[in-house]
Amino acid sequence: MKNNHSLIIGGGIVGATLALKLAQAKRPVTLVDAAPERDEASWQQLLSHRDARVYALSLASINLLKEVGAWQNIQTSGRKADYSQMQVWQLNGLGELLFGDSDTEHPNILGSMVEPLVIEHALWQRLNDSDISDYLTVIKGQKVVDMDWLGAQAGYQVTLENGEKISANLLVGADGRGSFVRRQAGIELDTLDYQQTAICCAIHTAMPHLATARQAMLPTGTLALLPLADITEADKARPQHWQSVVWTLPRNQALALLEEEPDYIAEQLAAASHYELGAIDKIESIASFPLAAQQAKSYIADNLVLIGDAAHGVHPLAGQGLNLGMLDVKELFAQLEYDYQRSGNSLWGSAQTLRTYERLRRPHNSLMMHSFSALNWLFAGSLAQMRPMQQLRSEGMYRVGKIKPLMRLLARQASGI
């Protein structure tokens, strides 16, 4: 075992980003991912199809991807859609909020919409670069089947399904909502089932999105229309017409709608948005997922720490799930490095370091999770449709929209910096 070694379980976006940060700092790290290894041809086959899902990357997340050398690969691919404005409105109400820059020639972006596979491919390319190979070991296609804590000085020994054993001073769980690491560590969850289902799809609209992310607050839940990158020559000849949709509905209503033909779903979707961007002439990649929020009761244990979805999962209402995970990466790396250097290069992943990380990240993530839940409650459901509540929402949104300093502050919050 190398000194000050970290073992990350889960090679998704959050886990891979942390691995790159550590390797760049010359801190030995092993990344274990259950997903099989793909060659470049396999990646290109996957990327040849448009993904209906996108991540709304904040400027903070973009800056982190730049630091690890992955954003440059995303820029080269052209598979990103920057957005400079964010429009939030409620139907049957007076309130509308418009964040961001209205300068159409030289706008300041709030963030960028990028398909998950595009980010993963960019990270995969970076993980294979020679400048970090001395400090990074990547193991693909292997699940962790056992974890043994060997004491505070030795850390953990994990066993892979092929029988290989790996030891590490610090074990990082970045293995998603169903985290094996979290369960094996005996860390429980606080959960909230919204009794809602999100329908996700890609749509081509009559009018262009104009680099604006839109979110309608409907009585049934939120409807997000998010810019998608133009990937074909036909798209680029008539740009800014493809968008990703996340449409939140009561579970039974969503499941019934999913039984219908795509054209019917497109008609219902256009009507639900009050034809904000006109008719929908194409719809692709219709899928769905149930909505629930969860948070680990603790982010840490002896020699163990959770990041990303293994630690928390929020309502997709504001598209902040991945951004919160990237902020976990930034803070955990900062605390590991700070305590390592001030200890004379002797402490790595100490209990004190991990407690500081948890103290800085868990309250912030809790606030975000409960804020999204409160917003969902404020706009969706029977109580939210009572006339006094509707009037309160309309008046509140109208007045907030008139306070320019507050709107600039909210825009900065949305960008994550």
Image (cartoon, rainbow, N blue to C red):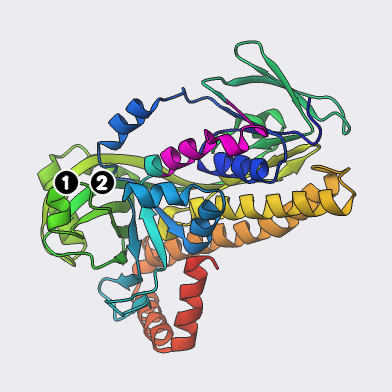
Residue 36 rendering spot, x and y as whole percentages: 46, 22
Comparing 364 with 198, the one in front is: 364
Q: Circle 2 — which element? A: strand
Residue type at tag 1: Ile
- Which image quarter: residue 206? bottom left
Local SS, label 1: strand
Q: Relative to residue 211, is residue 79 depicted above or below? A: above
Report x, y in % for residue 18. 61, 44
- Quadrant assignment for the N terminus: top right
Classed neighbour count for the residue bearing mark 1: other residues with Cα under 10 Å, few (<14), some (14–19), many (≥20): many
Magenta includes 125? yes
Relative image position of residue 160 (x, y in whole percent): 63, 17
- Does the residue at mark 1 contact the one at mark 2 (Cβ under 8 Å)? yes
Q: Check residue 94 for magenta coloring.
A: no
* Quarter where residue 356 is shown: bottom right
Residue at image coords 72%, 32%: 185
Residue underneath mark 1: 283
Segment colored magenta: 119-138
Q: Amino acid at mark 2?
A: Cys
Q: Residue furthest top?
A: 163
**On-image quarter of the C terminus:** bottom right
- Please name the residue shown 28% across and 45% down the image: 52
The disc placed on residue 201 is: 2
In primary-sequence order, the first of circles 1 and 2 is: 2
